[in-house]
Amino acid sequence: MKNYLKLLVLVSLMTVACKQNQETSEPSMAEDISVEENDSFKFWVWTGANKEKTDEDYTAEFKKYAASGIEAVLINTNTDPELLAHITPLAKAEGLEVHAWIMAMNRPGDSVALQHPDWYTVSRDGKSCFDTRPYVDYYQWLCPTRKESREHVLSLVEGLSKVEGISTVHLDYIRFCDIFLPIGLLPKYDLEQNVELPEFDFCYCDVCVDTFEKLHHKNPREMEHPELDIEWKQFRLNQIRAVVNDAYKIVHENGKQLSAAVFPYPEMADHMVRQRWDKWDIDMVLPMIYHNFYNEEIDWIGYATKQGVTDLKDKDTELHTGVFVPSLTPEELKQAILEAKNNGAKGVSFFDGGALKPEHLEVIKNMEL
Ligand SMILES: [Zn+2]
C-alpha cells in the first residue's frame, strides 16, 4: 500500500557464553521487537453492501475511494460472512483494507435472537426491547450478561473474523441503549431528558439483576435511585467490556484485529450509553465525533479527539476520528481533518461513503498530512 511503511526490526540481544567458563555463564537471551511504523494518516469510509450491487458497482466505488487517498473501507454486510468474502477481494484489488462492520449488541431483526425473547435487554420499568423498542424501530438490544445472547453475538464476530483478507472486525452498537440521546437529536424525538428516564435505562433482566446481587448484595430493582448507585453503573460498563475483551481474543485467534465505533470520548460514552472504551482490549477505536449531533462546532472535534488520545496514551489502541460528512461543507471537512490530526488522531473515518460528494473527495485527495 502506498504511503505505508512496514518496518520489522529484529533486535537480538545475545549473552554470549564465555568459552572458558561455559558452566557458569548466563543463558542466552533473545528479544524480538516488532516495530510497525505507519507514517501516513489513514482515511476510512463506511459503506453498505447488498446483494443487488454488482461486482462492477463495488469496483467502481472502491476505485473512487482509492483514487482519493482513502485506504480503508468499513463494510456493512448485515453480518453475512459469505457476502463479505465475496466483496473483500474486490476492495483489496483496489489497494483498500477491509473492516467487517457489525451491529453488536443492537441486533434488529436478528432471526436467531428473535426466537429467544429473553435474550433482550429489559428497561427499569420492566419492558423488554424484544417488543418495546426505545426511540426507534431499529433498537432491539441484546443483554451482554446472559450467556446465550452474548455467545450469539460472539459467534457472529467469529464468523466475520474467519473471512480471509479482512483487517479487523469492527464493532458498532457495542454498548447499552442511549440513556441520554445527543442533545441535538432531542427535538427530533420531541423529548426532554434532564434525568435518567426509566424507559431508556437498561438492563434490569433477571440475569443482570441476579448476577449483580450476588456480587454486591443489593438489588437495583428495589433502589429508589438506581441512577445514583455507582456499582450498578460500573457493573453494566464491565459487562460490555467483557464482551469486547472476549471478541478481542476471538478475532486475534483468527489472525485479525478488533476495532469499534464508539461515543466521542470515554466519560461522555460512559454518561450517555454505558460504554467506557478506554478500558477495553481493542486495537483501534473510531469515536463518532459528530459535532452537529451535540450542537457543537468544528473545534470540538479537536477537543474530543484529544480527550480520547490522552486517555489512551498508555495503551496500544489507535484512535481514528469519525466525522459526519452530511453536516460538513468541503472547507469544514478540511478543518475537521486538521482538528483530528493536530490533536493526535491516526486517521479520520468518514460517515458515510454516500455522503462524500466530488468536492469532498477533492479535499481528501489534496490534504497534505
Ligand atoms: Zn440483562
Image (cartoon, rainbow, N blue to C red):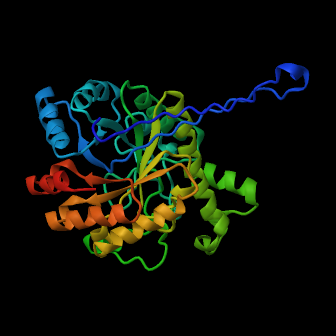
In the rendered view, would you say 335 is above or below 363? below
In the image, what residue occupies the spot 20% across and 48% down? 353
Residue 268 visible in the snapshot: yes
Total marks placed: 0
Quarter of the image where one finds residue 19: top right
Image coords of residue 335 (percent x, y): 24, 67
Front-most of residues 340 and 85? 340
Image quadrant where one finds the C terminus: bottom left
Residue 77 visible in the snapshot: no
Image coords of residue 357 (percent x, y): 11, 54
Quarter of the image where one finds residue 194: bottom left
Residue furthest to the front in view is 20
In the image, what residue occupies the spot 36% across and 69% down? 302
Please state if 225 lies on the left or on the right of 282 as rendered: right
Front-most of residues 275 and 200? 275
In the rendered view, would you say 18 is above or below 227? above
In the image, what residue occupies the spot 21% across and 34% down? 50
In the rendered view, would you say 226 is above or below 235? below
Image coords of residue 315 (percent x, y): 56, 52
Residue furthest to the left in view is 358
Please state if 172 lies on the left or on the right of 73 as rendered: right
In the image, what residue occupies the spot 54% across and 28% down? 253
Image coords of residue 126 (percent x, y): 52, 60
Residue furthest to the bottom in view is 194
Image quadrant where one finds the N terminus: top left
